Image (spheres, rainbow, N blue to C red):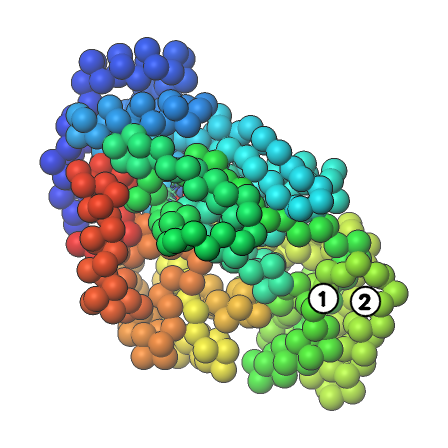
Amino acid sequence: LTKNRYPVNRGDYAILNDNHVQFFKNLLDNRIITDPDECESYNIDWIKNVRGYSTCVLKPKTTEEVSKILAFCNENRIAVCPQGGNTGLVGGSVPVFDEVILNTSLMRTIYNINGTSGVLICQAGCVLEDLDNALAEHGLMMPLDLGAKGLCHIGGNVATNAGGLRLLRYGNLHGSVLGVEAVKADGQIIDLLSALKKDNTGFHLKHLFIGSEGVLGIITKVAIQCPPKPLAINLAFLGLPSFKHVLKVLKQAKRDLGEILASCELIDQSTMRVSTENLKLRLPFPEEYPFYMLIESHGSNTVHDEEKLTVFLEEIMKNELILNGILAKAPSTIRKIWELRERLTEGFVLDGYVFKYDISLPIENFYSLVPVMQERLSGLKDVIRVSGYGHLGDGNIHFQVSCREFSQEILQKIEPFVYEYTSKLRGSISAEHGIGFRKPKYVHYSKSPESIVIMKQLKTLFDPKGILNPYKVLPP
Ligand code: FAD
Ligand code: 2HG
Ligand code: ZN
């Protein structure tokens, strides 16, 4: 349990003993897993990139139980790994060594949905898709949407400040989260569960928890501002010849669609083959193109939106910006097209090992890294594809290098080059997935030394014994 599988040493934490386990059992009845086989799936991340060796998974139902668990762990110096749906992509959601896993899957109560204000108040373990379905009954929807919606928890979303497919329109969680309730490492419950849109009474402490990846506290409840579910949804799926054309279409979409533009995603040809070849999904048209765009509109008036979309499509066709395109209106067709995009993470895993980079770059440079890396990695026979896709409208590319299996040689060709490249362009080395276990030593490529010092000071303030998600986020 303590052996060094990674280049980090186990911290000076207690090794779990029978007395500790008995305390948890008394507190949680049977909501504790200690059987090694049953613990297995909680120890391995979704993309099977990292694994821990925890022998104890705890499933509290209430904030008070979370508080008692943390107070006990803090007192006894037991390290804790907070876990939601375990769909995180940077190794933050699984232990590194034998940390106790505090999983939120039984914290799934929805307290209130206010159909007028649009405010949702719920526990952290509610699954994103379940919340979306519950909100639909009130004519509302979640402001965020991810391919992992069927598994990820809202607490995990807030803890990672997840972005997703409609951030372009609805903003990130720093905008939509009105309040949180969180438990500090020493068990103290911090009530920041305001449901108000406006509240300037001092520092906005909730923001510290949004994107804190479980190192400052455990989020137990959230209040979220939810937008109305759009009455009219349309999706344009386009094939394009070059990235220059892509940029022109993006500009045109912003101009012509204005406030109804909800999503603008890009997929390059090599990435699209992950969907068509690995996952055997079908493109809506038979030909292949160098680039594909998905442009979705959300509005309240079908006729009004169709007018805007017609102007947009006529304009891009007149200027010969696209090679092919369809406009989907039927929900079933829209869902099928989104599958090509949403299942890419799953499809890449079928290549073998994937080196993943989640980068923000200035829009003109959005795709420039891909050809540079294709050149840099050319001739390496184990490389299957060097490709990019992602949230074009938000300047966030998912750059991927896939190969049959992990290769040190390939890794050394990619890192730190990718981070240096991003840093030179003043981009971000983690646009939306966070830092987790995989990236702490690269934080300095995107954060100044002074801001790293403040991050460490905040960690000490919130968690002086360092029991919460050790080895993660903060640079060593
Ligand atoms: P976990 O993976 O369980 O945890 C993530 C991190 O948050 C960990 O550090 C964990 O310790 C911490 N944490 C979890 N719950 C809590 C809590 N209650 N309190 C404090 N800390 C906590 N991400 C995007 O940003 N955009 C996308 O479009 C996107 N699409 C994805 C698609 C797929 C198919 C997959 C597998 C992942 C995708 N992700 C995406 C990444 C991931 O889904 C998100 O980061 C998601 O928000 C994680 O939620 P989770 O409940 O699974 O959290
Ligand atoms: C997405 O946009 C997610 O689909 C996952 O952020 C990206 O798998 C990835 O790298
Ligand atoms: Zn993404």
How far across and how far down the image is residue 298, in percent? 73, 60
Q: Residues within 10 Å of mark 1 (few under 14, many from 20)?
A: many
- For residue 260, the mark is 1
Quarter-of-image position of residue 354 = bottom left
Residue sitting nearer the eye, 264 or 403: 264
- The vertical placement of 61 against 245, above or below, is above
How far across and how far down the image is residue 473, in percent? 28, 52
- For residue 305, the mark is 2
How far across and how far down the image is residue 57, in percent? 35, 25
Could one spot residue 424 in this view of the protein? yes
Determine whether the residue tagged by mark 1 lies in a helix, strand or loop.
helix
Residue sitting nearer the eye, 346 or 158: 158
Q: Amino acid at mark 2?
A: Asp
Q: Residue at x 46, y 55 (%)?
A: 200
Q: Amino acid at mark 1?
A: Ile
On the picture, is 330 further left or further right than 249?
Answer: right
Q: Residues within 10 Å of mark 2 (few under 14, many from 20)?
A: some
Residue sitting nearer the eye, 308 or 382: 308
**Residue found at the far bottom of this picture:** 319
